[in-house]
Amino acid sequence: MCKEKPYERSSCDSILNAKCLGCKNACLFKDKKVDDCIGVEYYIWPQENQYLIDGMQEILFDSKERLIKQPVVFIDFNYHNLGLFLTDSWLDTFKGARLILLTDKVMEPIAHYWFYHDRADTVISAIIFYNDDHQVVSSKSRAAFMGRVLRPAKGIKKLTDKEYALLSHLYHGETPKKVATKIGANVKSVYVTKLRGESKMGARLHSLFI
């Protein structure tokens, strides 16, 4: 049985069992698409946020533009799902797909970090930010369906490699002192890195871990 912490409640929701929202056939991600598929192939993961699903379906309902054979997966990149994205292997789950990250304000620097750390076989096509309007969301989505990659605008906050690594260590229960010993740094520099990351995210890390 999967024993989840509150902030990890989606960790057992496998993308393999996610249903395609592109047409009535609702094929699973793990299955071969049926011959009579009449829509674009896209998924929303994790699948718990029905408001997000309804909103995206409304935006994408008339979208038939597609020049790629890859499925498109919209990732609910909000702080409640933080634990899903603090591992270097999470992208492997989506091999062969194009991803769009839908991020809240707190997760914006982490989403931006991952945009530049995707894989050759798992491409992050775009980030939909918390303050993007309906038209921008629609435009970014269509671009992904057409195989384009949209680089975030200059000035968007992004975690550095050190800040991301530290966040991952702290999330998994390591103390700043233990992290300092592990990476061969002094504790003061670890705290400075922590404060810099918190400043970018606009939240104290411990408040995201409970």
Image (spheres, rainbow, N blue to C red):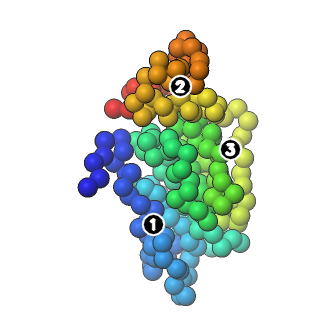
Q: Earlier in the sequence, mark 3 or mark 2?
A: 3
Specify the amino acid type for callout 2: Lys
Cα distance between the residues tagged 1 and 2: 35 Å
> Is 119 positioned to the left or the right of 181 in the image?
right
Specify the amino acid type for callout 3: Tyr
- The quadrant of the rendering that contains the C terminus is top left
Q: Earlier in the sequence, mark 1 or mark 3?
A: 1
In the image, is residue 4 above or below residue 197?
below
Callout 3 secondary element: loop
- Which residue corresponds to the image point at 66% horizontal and 73% vertical from the top-left? 69
> Would you identify the image quadrant in which residue 131 lies?
top right
- Which residue corresponds to the image point at 72% horizontal and 55% vertical from the top-left? 149
- Which residue corresponds to the image point at 45% horizontal and 41% vertical from the top-left? 82
In the image, is residue 113 above or below residue 193?
below
- Which residue corresponds to the image point at 71% horizontal and 64% vertical from the top-left? 147
Asked whether residue 117 is in view, the answer is yes
Callout 2 secondary element: helix
Specify the amino acid type for callout 1: Leu
Residue closer to the observer: 197 or 149: 197
Callout 1 secondary element: helix
Q: Residues within 10 Å of mark 3 (few under 14, many from 20)?
A: few
Which residue matches tag 1?
16
> Would you identify the image quadrant in which residue 188 lies?
top right
Which residue matches tag 3?
116
CB within 8 Å, label 3 to label 2: no
Which residue matches tag 2?
182
Residue closer to the observer: 175 or 210: 175
